[in-house]
Amino acid sequence: MTKTLSNIIALVVSVVAVHITYIGYIRPQASLVLEASRQAGQSAPRHLVVILKDYEQEICLILMLWGMFLILGKCLAILREQYLFSVDLLEEPAQEPEEAAEGEAAEDSPGEFHGLSSALKTLETLPPDIRETPLVKTLMTSLRRFLITQDVQNTSDAIESSVEALALKQDAENSMIRYLIWAIPSIGFIGTVRGIGQALSQADQALAGDIAGMTESLGIAFNSTLVALLISIALMFMLHQLQRLQDNLVVDTQDYCEAFLLNRISKGGDDAHPVKLESSPSLSVGRN
């Protein structure tokens, strides 16, 4: 299932779930509460179902659930990939005696990095869900660049360009979430305009002494804005947590490539050994 299809399904589920809740509970209960207050000659009470009963609040709740799905989905995807940073993905696989003899012959010629070539082949045979992770894609791009140019600086440039592209991609994928966080308060303000308009249309009744209709309309105006602003505050907090995880992913990807790839190829030859992840201070940035 593609991400687009799963996002559409999540939106449809949010619409159905919220609308069923509204027609089955919130609006009937709000009608009972308002009718009881009218019979008692009181203004509309500040009950939760009364605050949530209008269409603007329903739309805001739908968008809130959809936004939470988008944010949590991205957060879980990043957290599922964290274990890769504790694995040496460039470790040479065990070789058969014949392959080992061929590898030794290849290593005798200067500039040959037989182990890195076999590591690239190993990365290319990984399952698609692992092969498409940012870390593995960056490693594959950098390895190809080094095997073609055999230049450490070109490989470093490839790593830098890959992590920059990753950051730009993450920022672009967050555009829908940012739009939802902007749209929710706007919908609340639409409810404010609608409520004030209804209240002004009932000014004659208020001058005649019946202010119940005007106060109910003003309740629509302020309740919609209240709900929308609270939802936008919650979603903005979740978005900042997502961006923190994404920034950490970019930093960790670059640090991993520097520790496991650049250190290895800069030493060169048989003496090249990967830097242990625990001994690299820069890898702790963002994960602590």
Image: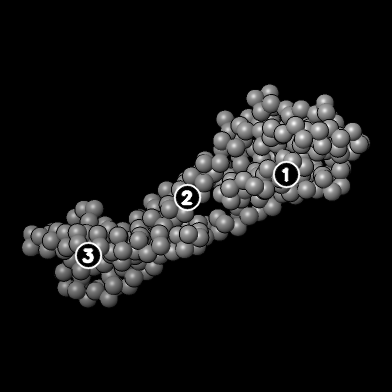
Residue 114 versus residue 6 in the image, above or below: above
Three-letter amino acid code at disc 2? Gly
Q: Position of residue 3 (x, y in %)?
A: 50, 59
Residue 1 versus residue 257 in the image, above or below: below
Residue beneath disc 1:
120
Q: Nearer the viewer, residue 144 or 161?
A: 144
Looking at the image, can residue 3 be seen? yes
Q: CA distance from mark 1 to mark 3?
A: 57 Å
Instruction: Please tell me whether mark 2 or mark 3 is closer to you in this view.
Output: 2
* Callout 1 crowding tier (Cα within 10 Å): few <14, some 14–19, many ≥20: many
Instruction: Please tell me whether mark 1 or mark 3 is closer to you in this view.
Output: 1
Residue beneath disc 2:
73
Three-letter amino acid code at disc 3? Ile
* Callout 2 crowding tier (Cα within 10 Å): few <14, some 14–19, many ≥20: some
At x 55%, y 55%, the residue is 174
At x 47%, y 54%, the residue is 70
Q: Position of residue 239 (x, y in %)?
A: 50, 48
The earlier-in-sequence mark between 1 and 3 is 3
Residue beneath disc 3:
23
Q: Quadrant of the C terminus?
A: top right
Instruction: Please tell me whether mark 1 or mark 2 is closer to you in this view.
Output: 1
The earlier-in-sequence mark between 1 and 2 is 2
The earlier-in-sequence mark between 2 and 3 is 3
